[in-house]
Image (spheres, rainbow, N blue to C red):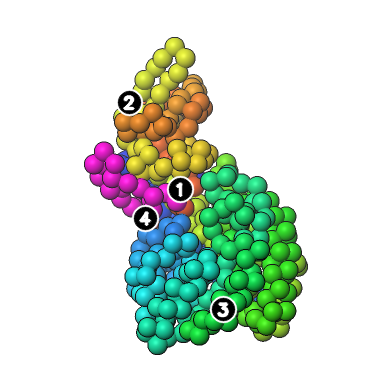
Amino acid sequence: MFSIDTLTRFQALETPFYFYDLGLLSQTLKACKTAADKYGFHVHYAMKANFDPKVLETIQSFGLGADCVSGNEVKAAIATGFRKEQVVFAGVGKSDKEINLALDADIFSFNVESIQELTIINDLAKAKDKTARVAIRINPNVDAHTHHFITTGLDENKFGINSWQLSEVAETLRSCSNIQFIGIHFHIGSQITDLTVYKSLCIRINEMQTWFEDHGFPVKVLNAGGGLGVDYHHPDQDPIPDFEGYFKVFKDFLNVIPGQEVHFELGRALVAQSASLISRVLYVKYGQKKNFLVLDAGMTELIRPMLYQAYMKIENISRNAQDSGLKTQDSRLKYDVVGPICESTDCFQKDVTLQESFRGDLIAVRTAGAYGQVMASRYNLRDAVGSVYSE
């Protein structure tokens, strides 16, 4: 819910923009850190979810590590103040340039996703007379029961190493003199709300840990990835995920050896609810079967609904403002809420029931703090979308 003062502030600003509630972000980070610290777990923030500078600074201030998937993310993490010994570098296609950058930065670990990558990192580390710490990313073949575009832990996905390749992995590790094996890594998908899925993951992690230990590779780090989902339907009612329940699954079902570290890589769960995309109604089009709200924001500013068919709550905050002094509308209509981009897919949501809306009304697309602004584009030579922060 947006306050009257916030709405008044928005009315004076050029739209579209992302509005970041840094207070809610801090509350979320505190809840996550408290729940993780209870069990001695380590959390790395998945930077791909949102790398807004103020967001990164806030996350870093809570002492989290950084999970990076590009060389530039590694650079940004270190520049923001994340300690190098808390930086991990994942990604199925790390370039030589990116690997060299991470080697020079002496990061904590590479999450390695193929046997060939192991040999490349070894060769590049050898050329620098360095030893690279690695965790092997394994496909546990656990179905996360989420959208197929964001499922990452099945044998058919491009990520990670399949279990039938483990013997070759062991052989390669023994031959790589500039590689230090430190652990195993998993990530099964995103927007997971059924915590029983993580119980299945724990069972597979236990099996894989036993395999490596039996083959002479002590496992120092168990990295369970992330993927914890958020409530897109009720952002005000349920703004902070159940971190306690999430971490307790791993406490109850992971076989943790004394001295072993358990790591997580959370992104969406930490930042999604902290931002909304704020847009204005440009035009209202009435038809016999459809009404359209044409916004000044579109797929160039927020592509998730078009790319993933993602549901995101849409509100007319001009008409919903309580005691704002604005004339409220009793009538409610259904609208297709669309953007201005010259693509038929440029539609946020069809048949949205809203209070009757008018040109100039402010529209909020909620729960947009993850995979929103970071995926924005300049298609149609659009202006880059800006950021506004809570005061």
Q: Give the spatial CA distance, label 2 vs label 3.
A: 61 Å
- Which numbered disc flags the more N-terminal residue, 1 or 3? 3
Please give the residue where the numbered disc 2 appears in the rendered image. Answer: 283
- Residue 336 location (% of width, % of height): 45, 26
Say which of 301 and 112 sits in front: 112
Q: Secondary structure at mark 4?
A: strand
Q: Quadrant of the C terminus?
A: bottom left
Amino acid under disc 4: Tyr
- Which numbered disc flags the more N-terminal residue, 2 or 1? 2
Q: Give the spatial CA distance, label 1 vs label 4.
A: 14 Å
- Residue 272 location (% of width, % of height): 49, 53
For residue 173, the mark is: 3
Amino acid under disc 3: Leu
Q: Secondary structure at mark 3?
A: helix
- Which numbered disc flags the more N-terminal residue, 2 or 4? 2
**Relative to 260, is 334 above or below?**
above
Q: Give the spatial CA distance, label 1 vs label 3.
A: 41 Å
Quarter of the image holding residue 123? bottom left
Instruction: Report whether residue 215 is seen.
Output: yes
| Left/right of residue 159 with respect to residue 340 in the rendered view | right
For residue 389, the mark is: 4
For residue 368, the mark is: 1
Q: Does the CB distance between marks 1 and 4 fall below 8 Å?
A: no
Amino acid under disc 1: Ala
Say which of 126 and 280 sits in front: 126
- Which numbered disc flags the more N-terminal residue, 1 or 4? 1
Seen at 37% across and 84% down, the residue is 128
Membership of 69 in magenta stretch: no
Q: Does the CB distance between marks 3 and 4 fall below 8 Å?
A: no
Say which of 13 and 351 sits in front: 351
